[in-house]
Amino acid sequence: MAKELESILAAGAVLWRHTENDAIEIALVYRPRYDDWSLPKGKLEAGEHLLACAAREIREETGAIAHFGPLIGEITYDVEGESKTVTYWSARAVEIQGRTAPTAEISQVRWLSPSAARAAFTYDHDRDVLNAFLEIGTGTIPIVLLRHAKAVKRIDWDGDDDDDRPLDSKGEIQAHQLGSILNAFGTLEIHSSDANRCQQTASVLAEKWGTTVHTEPALSEYAYKRDPIAAVNRARELLQLERPIIVCSHRPVLPHLAEALLQETLLDTPTSGLEPAGAWVIHARGGIVIAIDYLQSPE
């Protein structure tokens, strides 16, 4: 029987920026150990979320603070007897600082046009990822449909109003972890159901980012049951704001909001509910949805 390869998880991005004539350039990194030009990426650290890993590796290898866009996909290949799976996002460089990756790992960063980058890449799989990025395009805005972090179970809650049910200890940890993960999308305007478990989740994010929470009574679980049309209409209004936004709501509500936002697209509507602190990230351009990604909850 053939020996199964060990699996290595990694994350990275097609990092891009605008040029003076509004064209785009792609970042390539040179690794002396492998004598190759490739997309910036790196291995997942213990307990790290893939999106947070991608943002960290971009900063370390290129010095760029980036705002992430749609998920591009993943590739799997063998490296020295091990199977490696790399997940890639689109990411726009908004600020360039000093690189922190050791020179022995990354000695050069080049910014090239997409056609020049395609020619310069050492590996075909990087060309495939670049091609997928170009198909999606740039200029998207994220709408994060976030389920609140883990709450005290209904059966264990002795309060009179279920809307007052708070986060449990794991949920409090998840809420703090979300701040570091969702920060990859840049500054997000926070909108939340008025239920306590949503407000707590949103408040942790607001405190981390130095911003405020916009309360959305129509997006609570019980308000949705009374008037689903009002919730759907409010979600559509938020989409048309064309600003990066988080909508923190409930498992029974979020699939219907996603379905409404995807109604006039060819994209598949999510069919399963989100786990606590999980999210769907909708990416829109000009108020039109062009992609939706699943974002796993923090462990």
Image (cartoon, helix red, strand yellow):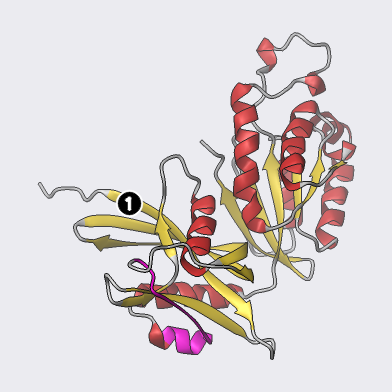
Task: Pick out the residue farthest to the left.
Answer: 1
Residue 123 at what x, y percent from top left?
33, 76
* Quarter of the view holding residue 251: top right
> In the image, what residue type sits under mark 1?
Ile
Above or below residue 216? Residue 14 is: below
Secondary structure of the residue carrying numbered label 1: strand
Residue at the image point whose x is 50% and y is 46% from the top: 49
Residue at the image point whose x is 43% and y is 71% from the top: 39
Q: Write down the region rendered in magenta.
A: 105-118
Report how many numbered discs are placed on residues in the image: 1
Q: Is residue 277 in sight in this rendering?
A: no
Q: Is residue 261 left or right of residue 271?
A: right
Residue in front for this viewpoint, 284 or 38: 38
Above or below residue 175? Residue 135 is: below
Residue at the image point whose x is 70% and y is 51% from the top: 144
| Magenta residue check for 16 | no
| Magenta residue check for 112 | yes
Above or below residue 274? Residue 138 is: below
Q: Is residue 176 in sight in this rendering?
A: yes
Residue 63 at what x, y percent from top left?
54, 67
Q: Is residue 126 left or right of residue 221?
A: left
Label 1: few (<14), some (14–19) or many (≥20) C-alpha neighbours in 10 Å: some
Residue in front for this viewpoint, 172 or 226: 172
Residue at the image point whose x is 66% and y is 57% from the top: 185
Task: Pick out the residue farthest to the top.
Answer: 158
Residue 36 at what x, y percent from top left?
32, 76
Question: Which residue matches tag 1?
Answer: 8
Q: Is residue 195 left or right of residue 119?
A: right
* Quarter of the view holding residue 282: bottom right
Residue in front for this viewpoint, 235 or 130: 130
Residue 168 at what x, y percent from top left?
65, 21
